[in-house]
Amino acid sequence: MATLEIEYKFIEIQTGGAYSTYRERLSILTKKSVVTIKNDDMNCFWYALTIQVYRNHQKYNDIRDGSNICTKLAKELCNMCGYRDWE
């Protein structure tokens, strides 16, 4: 006869910074750790990857704001990865 045994474990997750359990959309989007990708094409992945890869760049704030430098770096990153189809 087969038996089923289920074991539950709980851990306490340390909080840091301005931790909040409030999960309204506007509250989440105004957090500093959330980066909103602003674009009008289908290349969200490349913009998000660019923001992550260039997080120590001297113009990081401009990159994060979705300026022309972000588009330029995202296209370069896309091409360096072997993808030529920038839509």
Image: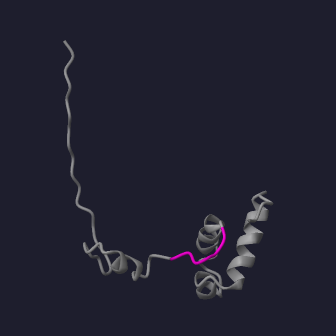
State how many labels appear: 0
Q: Which residue does the image show at 68% across and 79% down from the upper left?
A: 70
Q: How does the figure colour the protein chain or chains? A: one colour
Residue 2 belongs to magenta span: no
Q: Indicate left or right for 20 with 34 as reference.
A: left
Front in this rendered view, residue 80 or 23: 23
Q: Indicate left or right for 79 with 21 as reference.
A: right
Q: Indicate left or right for 64 with 68 as reference.
A: left
Instruction: Report the magenta residues as a range.
Output: 36-41
Which is the main secondary structure of the residues drawn in magenta? loop
- Above or below, 8 against 78 in this view is above
Q: Which residue does the image show at 79% across and 64% down from the upper left?
A: 79
Which residue appears farthest toward the front when viewing the image?
A: 40
Residue 39 belongs to magenta span: yes
Please identify the quadrant where the C terminus is shown: bottom right
Where is residue 15, by image quadrant?
A: bottom left
Front in this rendered view, residue 73 or 11: 73
- Above or below, 9 against 46 in this view is above
Q: Which residue does the image show at 77% across and 70% down from the upper left?
A: 76
Q: Whole-percent x and y of residue 31?
A: 39, 81
Where is residue 80, by image quadrant?
A: bottom right
Q: Whole-percent x and y of residue 60?
A: 61, 84
Please identify the quadrant where the N terminus is shown: top left
